[in-house]
Image: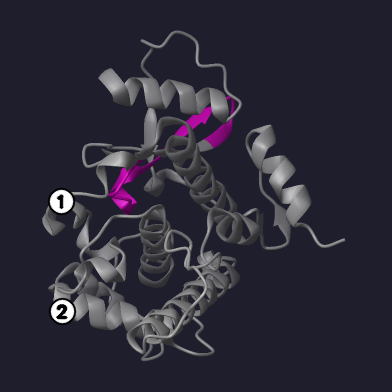
């Protein structure tokens, strides 16, 4: 049973309304389930898709970044037989306008296996951007579908050399290990993760998201090379890796799962998706 307090309560109640729920009184408590309680891969997909929509709403309308997206901070609310993804635990969140100043340690927040790869680098100086949270969600999905046979199953040693057992090490190693391994994932060409059969529908999600990250960081490297050489370069949007890894990119991938349309909550994203669809 979860009863959020203070600002977290306001975010939670407003987000429920945004997702199309009647929130009742702001002081009501409600039952929250863990991901382990999900029984179908489609329910998992809907929960992750809801989390992206919640994150966008909190950033756009409350000007808040979560900064600690992890498997443990994604919860499920069930109402009238329908499951809603909930982004929980805003303890490390911050106002967007506080992201531009301060020590690097202020920006280096999160749960290590799921942190954006840049945050593990000693050269990274911040700030924390919304794309770092979206990259964290990519790792949440990646580790879940490659390490666990189902949401409720415990981790077991790989049954074949092809299985991505190396991700288990992400829970144990330091920043230098993690930045190297995550960079390998992002920069890999023709990358395809080895997922458990239960999660097979997530394969295309992961391929598309990894490709978007790869293209974005390639464009960033090209831009930085131009600047080092003293050449003029067009402006580069750091928040979206020049539109390669934006909310629109992520939603375009995640609004469908195994050829089935998921529920897009709220009219805003429904209208955006209509514009993004090919004519």
**Magenta residues?**
65-83
Determine if the magenta segment contains residue 149. Answer: no
Q: Nearer the viewer, residue 135 or 160?
A: 135
Image spot of residue 47 (x, y percent): 50, 45
Asked whether residue 214 appears in the rendered view, the answer is yes
147 left or right of 257 in image: left
Residue at the disc numbered 2: 176
Q: Which residue occupies 59% across, 53% down? A: 42
Choose between 264 and 1: the one closer to the eye: 264
Nearest-to-viewer mark from 2 and 1 = 1
Could you tell whether 55 is left or right of 1 in the image?
Answer: right
Q: Quarter of the image for the C terminus: give it.
A: bottom right
Mark 1 lies on a secondary structure that is: helix
186 to the left or right of 17:
left
Residue shown at 42% from the left, 63% from the top = 238
Q: Is residue 105 left or right of residue 28?
A: left
Q: CA distance from mark 2 to mark 1?
A: 19 Å
Q: Residue at x 43, y 36 (%)?
A: 58
């Amino acid at each position: 049973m979860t009863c959020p307090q203070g600002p977290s309560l306001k975010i939670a109640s407003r987000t429920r309304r945004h997702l199309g729920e009647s929130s009742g009184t702001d002081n009501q408590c409600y039952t929250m389930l863990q991901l382990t309680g999900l029984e179908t891969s489609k329910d998992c997909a809907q929960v992750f898709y809801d989390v992206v929509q919640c994150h966008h709403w909190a950033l756009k309308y409350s000007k808040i970044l979560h900064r600690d997206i992890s498997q443990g901070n994604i919860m499920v609310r069930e109402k009238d037989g329908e499951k809603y993804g909930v982004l929980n635990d805003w303890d490390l969140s911050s106002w967007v306008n506080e992201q531009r100043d301060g020590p690097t340690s202020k920006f280096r927040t999160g749960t290590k296996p799921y942190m954006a790869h840049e945050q593990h680098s000693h050269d990274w100086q911040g700030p924390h951007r919304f794309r770092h949270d979206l990259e964290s969600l990519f790792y949440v999905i990646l580790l879940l579908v490659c390490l666990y046979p189902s949401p409720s199953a415990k981790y077991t040693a790989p049954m074949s050399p092809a299985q991505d057992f190396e991700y288990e090490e992400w829970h144990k190693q330091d920043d230098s290990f993690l930045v190297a391994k995550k960079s390998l994932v992002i920069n890999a060409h023709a990358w395809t993760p080895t997922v458990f059969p239960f999660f097979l529908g997530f394969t295309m999600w992961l391929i598309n998201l990894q490709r978007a990250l790869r293209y974005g960081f390639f464009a960033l490297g090209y831009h930085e090379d131009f600047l080092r050489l003293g050449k003029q370069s067009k402006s580069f949007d750091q928040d979206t890796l020049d539109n390669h890894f934006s909310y629109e990119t992520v939603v375009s991938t995640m609004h469908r799962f195994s050829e089935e349309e998921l529920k897009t909550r709220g009219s805003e994203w429904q209208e955006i998706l209509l514009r993004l669809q090919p004519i």
